[in-house]
Image (cartoon, rainbow, N blue to C red):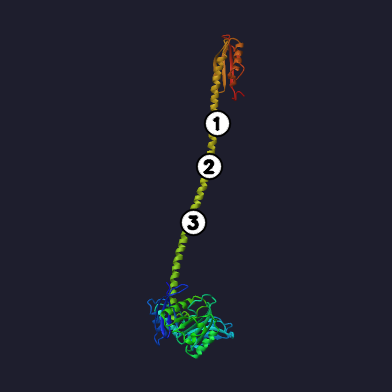
């Protein structure tokens, strides 16, 4: 919720207007009462602020205690002057008209279009420093903040329908009569008079001002009561809009219009802002002492923090070194395990080779045994098949690879038939049969024979 407030201070009226925020401000609460005579600006500001309940607000003070007028300065003086230098020059030029010292006052100005002679013109508002201090003190003591001081003049109360729509504003605040003319939001001319509305000179100035206005310009009247007949009969006054400074509802419209004009650059009047007060020597010393103690505390806290950080970093470094040592040990252990793995793989390969050789030997042995069994069975079967009536086998003697068959025969032919038959049997496929050897037995007269058989594939048979 916005906390902006306008205080109106004139010779006849005190008013307070609390406004909402946003681009189109409106008055939420208002209070108006007659003013006190011969009171200071601070007293009147405090009285106006006390009309409402909440006083801790952002406050604009609009008062007719400000001098308001237009100032013309030659282009040769304005050339090269900017900022504070130009503002001081305008305030010095206004001293003759305002009667307020430029060095003992606060002021603000808004540029106006140059006049017919090419001189630079400015809309100036000026107020004595003593009034500024008393108003600021009253607002600060109430818990508020003063945003600026200005004259209550506002260019337009009724917004224009278009940026080029011409308008005129006639305003009477206490003894000041103001004439403002423009198009849309732009201000084209400003004129101030100090004489009353009833004087003949004022009427002549009105006629001269309105002659330069566009025929279809709308007129807005701000002042107490209705326009005088001599002014109301002027052409732009036909169908004019009226804001009575004695009506609270009309003043609420005026306050909303003044606040809206401040949001549009170039559309409002000059606003005096209060520069920040310089710090006193005692306050400066106190703040310096507090800042010194604060810096000492911050330095100590920073030292403690950095010490703790260094300790944490040192602990992390030690932890990292321990991890590096463990990694090195793990690496060495891994190397040893790798070597052991390689040795184990070699042993496995050797065992695999041995197992393969053993399997081969076993297979060979099985084949030998099988062949041996077959060989002997074949030999026995063959001996049965080759038997002869004139010869018989008495003895069979064998070794691992050889067999000796010994027997007796009645004649050599029987021996040769036995050997020949043996070679034609299946035993000849497994045994190599050597020629038979014979000898005579002197006791019996029979022939002893011996037939040698060698196993095929053995070293003896080769």
Residue 32 found in image quarter = bottom left
Q: Element type at marker 1?
A: helix
Find residue 343 and name its label: 2
Q: Is residue 87 above or below residue 362?
A: below
Q: Picture coordinates of residue 153 (x, y %)?
A: 48, 82
Q: CA distance from mark 2 to mark 3?
A: 33 Å
Q: Is residue 297 left or right of residue 446?
A: left
Residue 154 image point, x, y percent = 48, 80
- State whether residue 92 appears in this view: no
365 sits to left or right of 59 = right
Q: Secondary structure at mark 2?
A: helix
Q: Is residue 294 visible in the rendered structure shown here? A: yes
Residue at the image point whose x is 44% and y is 69% from the top: 300
Secondary element under disc 3, as helix, strand or loop, is helix
Q: Residues within 10 Å of mark 2 (few under 14, many from 20)?
A: few
- The quadrant holding residue 33 is bottom left
**C-alpha gap between disc 1 and disc 2:** 25 Å
Nearest the camera: 14 or 387?
14
434 displayed left or right of 334: right
Could you say which disc has been placed on residue 321 in the image? 3
User: Residue 201 at what x, y percent from top left?
Assistant: 51, 90
Q: Residues within 10 Å of mark 3 (few under 14, many from 20)?
A: few
Q: Given the current orientation, which residue lies at the most extreme left position? A: 53
**Dividing the image into 4 quarters, which one contains the N terminus?**
bottom left
Look at 54% across and 20% down and name the residue there: 377
The residue that mark 1 highlights is 360
Compared with residue 10, is residue 436 higher up or lower down, i.e. above or below? above
- 187 or 160, which lies in front? 160
- Find out whether the residues at labels 2 and 3 contact each other: C-beta distance under 8 Å: no
Front residue of 407/353: it is 353
Query: In the rendered structure, which disc, 1 or 2, sits on the residue that comes first in sequence?
Result: 2
Mark in the foreground, 1 or 2: 1
């Amino acid at each position: 919720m916005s906390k902006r407030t306008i205080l109106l201070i004139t010779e006849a009226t005190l008013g307070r207007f609390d406004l909402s925020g946003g681009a189109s401000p409106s008055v939420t609460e208002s209070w108006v009462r007659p003013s006190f005579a011969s009171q200071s600006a601070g007293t009147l500001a405090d009285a106006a602020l006390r009309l409402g309940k909440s006083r801790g607000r952002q406050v604009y003070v609009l008062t007719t205690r400000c001098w308001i007028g237009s100032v013309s300065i030659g282009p040769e003086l304005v050339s090269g002057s900017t900022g504070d230098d130009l503002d001081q020059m305008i305030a010095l030029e206004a001293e003759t008209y305002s009667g307020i010292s430029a060095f003992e006052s606060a002021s603000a100005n808004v540029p106006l279009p140059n006049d017919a002679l090419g001189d630079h013109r400015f809309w100036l508002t000026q107020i004595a420093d003593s009034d500024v201090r008393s108003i600021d003190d009253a607002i600060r003591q109430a818990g508020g903040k003063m945003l600026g001081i200005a004259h209550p003049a506002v260019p337009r109360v009724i917004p224009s329908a278009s940026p080029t729509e011409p308008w005129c504003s006639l305003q009477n605040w206490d003894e000041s009569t103001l004439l403002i003319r423009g198009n849309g939001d732009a201000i084209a001319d400003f004129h101030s008079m100090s004489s009353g509305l009833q004087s003949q000179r004022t009427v002549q100035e009105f006629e001269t001002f309105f002659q330069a206005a566009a025929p279809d310009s709308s007129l807005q009247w701000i002042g107490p009561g209705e326009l005088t007949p001599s002014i109301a009969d002027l052409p732009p006054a036909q169908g004019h809009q009226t804001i009575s400074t004695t009506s609270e509802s009309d003043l609420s419209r005026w306050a909303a219009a003044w606040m809206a004009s401040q949001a549009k650059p170039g559309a409002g009047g000059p606003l005096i802002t209060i520069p920040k007060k310089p710090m006193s020597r005692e306050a400066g010393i106190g703040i310096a002492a507090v800042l010194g103690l604060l810096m000492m505390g911050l330095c100590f806290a920073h030292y403690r923090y950095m010490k703790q950080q260094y300790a944490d970093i040192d602990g992390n470094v030690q932890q990292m070194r321990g991890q590096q040592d463990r990694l090195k040990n793990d690496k060495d252990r891994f190397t040893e395990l790798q070597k052991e793995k390689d040795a184990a793989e070699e042993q496995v390969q050797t065992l695999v080779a041995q197992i393969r050789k053993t399997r081969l030997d076993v297979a060979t042995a099985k084949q030998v045994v099988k062949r041996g069994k077959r060989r002997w069975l074949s030999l026995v079967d063959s001996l049965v098949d080759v038997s002869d009536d004139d010869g018989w086998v008495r003895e069979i003697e064998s070794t691992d690879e050889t067999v000796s068959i010994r027997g007796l025969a009645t004649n050599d032919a029987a021996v040769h038939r036995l050997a020949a038959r043996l070679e034609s049997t299946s035993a000849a496929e497994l045994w190599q049969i050597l020629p038979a050897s014979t000898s005579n037995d002197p006791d019996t007269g029979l022939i002893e024979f011996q037939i040698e058989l060698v196993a095929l594939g053995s070293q003896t048979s080769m």
